[in-house]
Image (cartoon, rainbow, N blue to C red):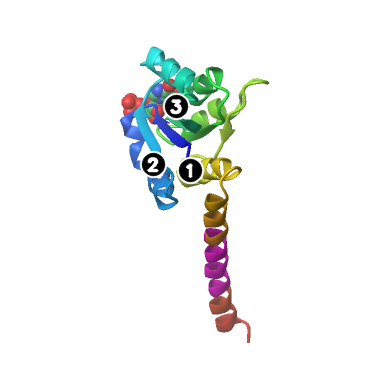
């Protein structure tokens, strides 16, 4: 199976990013985690992106706060799908990171999830790998059905209490 790369601009992003690791783990998807910064370690970030495909990765998740250029810098140097997580790490509550991650110029897409949306970023990476992996696709179907059952149970409880 292809690996997923989980990159973050700083270790201060880890408390949010950790949810992506646990989600990939839950689905048995192999991953590698790194702290790389388009600003602070541009050479390492570029080299990682340029070699990612031949190093066995199928998707790259890049999380960064403030002037969040990491995901865009990844996209500039690989044709693998890049998923950006804008991190809430400034006085602007993550809006700065959201806009700098999502507003990519034409030809350089970054699939941007919600501010601090680490779980969805991991699920999107899993869905990308599941395009060619039927076992993984089945795990996604089972998880969706479980979630739906939980919501239906909540509906039953609320309805029973208030719909007289
Ligand atoms: N946005 C970026 C990039 C980048 O885009 O490459 N590198 C670090 N950062 C962000 O700076 C914030 C503060 O970092 P520190 O906590 O290390 O000062 C973090 O949220 C990080 O993702």
The residue under the point 49% across, 29% down is 97
Callout 3 crowding tier (Cα within 10 Å): few <14, some 14–19, many ≥20: many
Magenta residues span 143-154
Badge 2 element: helix
Which one is earlier in the sequence, the residue at label 3 or at label 2? Answer: 2
Would residue 146 be counted in the magenta stretch?
A: yes
| Disc 3 residue: CB within 8 Å of ligand 1 | yes
Would residue 40 be counted in the magenta stretch?
A: no
Q: Which mark is residue 16?
A: 2
Residue 45 is situated, as x and y percent measured from the top left of the image, at 41, 19
Foreground mark, 3 or 1, reads 1
Q: Which mark is residue 96?
A: none
Residue tagged by mark 3?
Answer: 66
The residue under the point 43% across, 26% down is 55
The residue under the point 57% across, 40% down is 128
Residue 74 appears in the picture as rendered: yes
């Amino acid at each position: 199976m292809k690996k997923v790369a989980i990159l973050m601009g700083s270790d201060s992003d880890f408390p949010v990013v950790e949810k992506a690791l646990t989600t990939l783990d839950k689905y048995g998807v192999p991953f590698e985690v790194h702290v790389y910064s388009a600003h602070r370690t541009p050479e390492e970030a570029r080299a990682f992106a340029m070699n990612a495909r031949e190093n066995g990765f199928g998707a790259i998740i890049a999380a960064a706060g403030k002037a969040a250029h990491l995901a865009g810098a990844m996209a500039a140097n690989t044709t693998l799908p890049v998923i950006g997580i804008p991190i809430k790490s400034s006085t602007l509550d993550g809006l700065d990171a959201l806009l700098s991650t999502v507003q990519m110029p034409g030809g350089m897409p970054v699939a941007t999830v919600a501010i601090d949306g680490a779980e969805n970023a991991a699920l999107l990476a899993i869905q990308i790998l599941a395009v060619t992996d039927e076992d993984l696709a089945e795990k996604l179907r089972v998880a969706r059905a479980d979630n739906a059952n939980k919501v239906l149970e909540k509906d039953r409880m609320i309805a029973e209490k208030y719909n007289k």
